[in-house]
Amino acid sequence: MGDYPSRSASTRAGGSSVTARHARSAGSGVSPIPPDDLDGSRPPLGGGGALPRKARFSMEAGFRGLTTAAGAMVLVIIVAIAVFLVSKAVPALQANTENFLTYKAWFPNDAEPKFGIAALAFGTVLTSVLALIVAVPIALGIALFLSHYAPRRLANPLGFVIDLLAAVPSVVFGLWGRDVFREPVQDLSVWLNKYFSWLPIFGGDGPFGRSIMLGSLVLAIMVLPIVTSLSREVFQQTPLMNEEAALALGATKWEMIRTAVVPYGKPGVIAAVMLGLGRALGETIALALTLGIVFNISFNLIQSGGNSIAANIANTFGEANATGRGALIASGLVLFAITLVVNMAARAIIYRRREFRDSAA
Amino acid sequence: MSLLEQEVPGVVMTPDHIRSKKLPWPVDLGIAVVALAVSAAVVYGLGIGNWVLVVVLGVAFYLAGMFAAASRVEGRRSARNRLWKTLIYGACLLAILPLASVVWTLVSKGAARLDGDFFGSSMNNIGARDANGGAYHAIVGTLQQVGIATLMAVPLGVLGAIYLVEYGRGKFALTVRFFVDVMTGIPSIVAGLFILAFWVLIVSPWFNNGTPRFSGFAASLALTVLMLPTIVRSTEEMLRLVPGPLREGAYALGVPQWKTILKVVLPTALPGIVTGIMLAVARAAGETAPVLLVAGGAAAINFDPFSGNQSSLALFVYQQAGDASRYAPDRAWTAALTLVALVLVLTIAAKLLARRNRLS
C-alpha cells in the first residue's frame, strides 16, 4: 500500500482495455491454435489443413491452467482462513461457561473456562477510532502540503521519506512508544487530569501512563504515513484543468483546493482512511507494548488500562492451553470479520470510482 | 476607445497595481511575537503549565490574531486562505516531531550494543545479569523465514498476476481481483492464527509423532499469506503497463500466448516486478505477530527451519522489550536498529530500481 511503483501511468500506455482487446484478437486470428479454443472443437484457423492439429495437452492450456490455479489460490486461502479458524474456535466456544459476546474478562485456561470478547472488541475499536481522529486531519494536511503547497524540490524527497516511514516495522513504534513517548504522554495526562477531571474521559486518580491515550497516539503515528501516502497519490491526480478553472474564476488557493481537489479526491481519501482503519484494527505489537492490559469497558483515556484483541493474543498466547488457544483463535476470528468488513467497504468505495482503482492500492 | 486605453489620472494599469492589498510580513511576524508573549504571560502568570502549553496557546492566539488582521487588510476570503495555509504547514511540522524522535531514538539508543558480539552470538545461556548476548540466532531466523516465504510467494503471486492480466475474464477474475485487494488488509496476527490452526495444530503432528510443533517453516507460511496479495497487486500493475503492440508483435510472428508472456511480457516488466517483490519482502521481514504465534521464539541458534523453535529479529525485539534484565533494552534497541536498517535498505533499493524502470 502506497509502495507500489508508479501507478498513475497505468491509465495511459497500454491500459488494461487496450491490452485485452489486442491480445485476444491477435491471438485468435494468427496463432494456429486459437487461445480461446480450449476443447479443440473448431477447425484450425488460417490456411487449410497445413497447420498442425490441436494437441490434446498443449503448453498453452497447461500454462493457462497453472496461472488460473495460482489466481484461485487467493480465494482458497481466504476460505481456508475462515474454515480453520472456525474449526479451532468452536470447541473452545462450546467449553465457554460465559457469554462470549458480552462477558468482559479472559480466563480461558481455568477448569471452567470463562472468556468474552466485549472488553477486547471495545478497546480495539476505541483505540483505532481515536488514532484515526488524530491522524487523519494531520495526514490530509501533509498530503495537501506535498501535493499543492511544497515546492517540487522539497515535496519529492519528503514524500520518499513518508513512504519509508510506512515501511518501519510496528515493533519499533511500539518500543519507542513504551520507552520514549510514555513520559510526555504521562505528563500530559497528569495535566489534563488536574484541570479537566470534570470530564469523564480525563477523570480518575491514576496511575497514568500506559493508557488508551498512549496506545492510540502511537497508533496514530503509525497510521499517519499510510494515509498520507495514499491521499497524496489521489490529490496529485486531480485534473489540472479543474484546478486552473477554479483559479481562473478567482478562487484563492484554499478555495481551489476545497472546490476542485477535495471533491475529486474524496472517494480515494475515504478509501485511504478505511485502509488505515483496517491497519489500526489489526495492529498487534505496538499496542501490546503500550496499552495497560486491563479488561474493562471504560471511556477513560488517561488512566492506565485498555486492551485490544490483537494485543491480547500476543500477550496471553504464551500461557494458553488448548482451550485458551481456541479462545484466542475465536477472538482472532472476530478481528478477521471486523477487518474484512472494513476492507471490503473500502474496496467497494474504490471500485465505484474507476479512476482510483489502480491508484489507491 | 477600449477600456484599457482610458487613462485615469494617477492610476497605472500594471499587474502590480491590480493586485489586492497584502498583509505585510513584519505585521505577520509581530502578531506571532505578541501572541507568544501573551500566551507566556497567561500560562506563567496563572501557573497552569510549562513551555509546551505556551507554544500551543501561542499558536492558537497567533491564528486568531492573524485571521483578524488579515480579514481587515485583505478581506475574509484571503484571510481564510492564509489560515488554512498556516494550518497545513503546521500539520507538517507537527507530524515531523514524533517521526524525527523515533529516528533519533533508534540511532542513539541502538548504537549502544552495535558490536561484533551482538552479531556473532545468540542468547543461549545468557542470564539476566549478563551484559553480552546477541541476535545472531534471530538474524538467521529472519533470513531463513523470509527467504522461504519469498520462494513460495513469488511464483504464486506472479502467476496469479499473469492470470489476472492475461487470461482472467469475467466474474471469476473480478472476484479474484477483489479478494486480492481484501487480502491485503488481513491483519498479520490473523494470518498467524490461521497457520497456527492449520499447520502447527493439524498438519505438523503428522510429522512429529502426534505432538504439534513450532517451526520456522510455519512462520514462512504465515509470511507467504501476508506477502502474496502485495506481490499480486504490484506485479499486476506492472504487467498492465507493458504496451499492447509488444504482445501483438509476438503474436504476429506466430508465438503462442504462453511463450509471449514468458519471453516478452515478463522480461519487459521485470524491474517493476522485482521492485514490488522487494517491498513485500521488506514488509514481511518486520512482522512480529505471526512469528510469535507459529515459530515460538528461541534463545539458541537453530539452522533448521523445518523443526524446532526459531526466533526472528522482530520477535527478538519484542521479547527483549518484555525482559526484566537491565541489559535487555539495549539489546532490543540495537536489534530494532538492525531490523530497520534491513527493511530500509530493501525499500530504498526497491525505490531506486523503480526509478530506473522504463515502463513507469
Image (spheres, coloured by chain):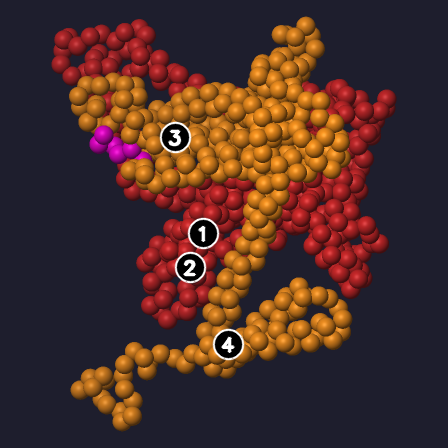
Chain under callout 3: B
Q: Which chain is orange?
A: B
Q: Residue at x 54, y 31 (%)?
A: B285
How far, Cα to Cα, is label 4 from label 3? 50 Å
In this view of the protein, which residue sits in the foreground, A112 or B32?
A: B32
Contact between labelled residues 3 and 1, with CB atoms less than 8 Å apart: no
C-beta proximity under 8 Å, tags 2 and 4? no
Q: Is residue A263 left or right of residue B104?
A: left
Report in which chain the residue with disc 2 lies.
Answer: A
Q: Are marks 1 and 2 in contact (CB under 8 Å)?
A: yes
Q: Amino acid at mark 4?
A: Asp
Mark with earlier residue (4, 3): 4
Q: Residues within 10 Å of mark 2 (few under 14, many from 20)?
A: some
Q: Is residue B203 left or right of residue A347?
A: right
- Identify the amino acid type marked 2: Ala
Measured Cα–Cα span from mark 1 to mark 2: 9 Å
Residue behind mark 3: B274
Task: Say what amino acid the circle numbered 3 marks.
Answer: Val
Instruction: Answer with the quarter of the image where residue B348 lies.
Output: top left
| Residue labelled with disc 1 | A158
- Quadrant containing the N terminus of chain B is bottom left
Q: Is residue A333 visible?
A: no
The answer as to whether the residues below labels 1 and 3 share one chain is no
Dot 1 or dot 2, earlier in sequence: 2
- Residue A228 is situated, as x and y percent measured from the top left of the image, at 50, 49
Task: Measure the alpha-carbon separation of dots 4 and 1.
Answer: 27 Å
Q: Which residue is mark 4?
A: B28
Query: Which disc is residue A150 wearing?
Result: 2
* Chain of the residue on which disc 1 is drawn: A
Q: Is residue A203 above or below residue A255?
A: above
- The question of residue B198 being in magenta is answered with no
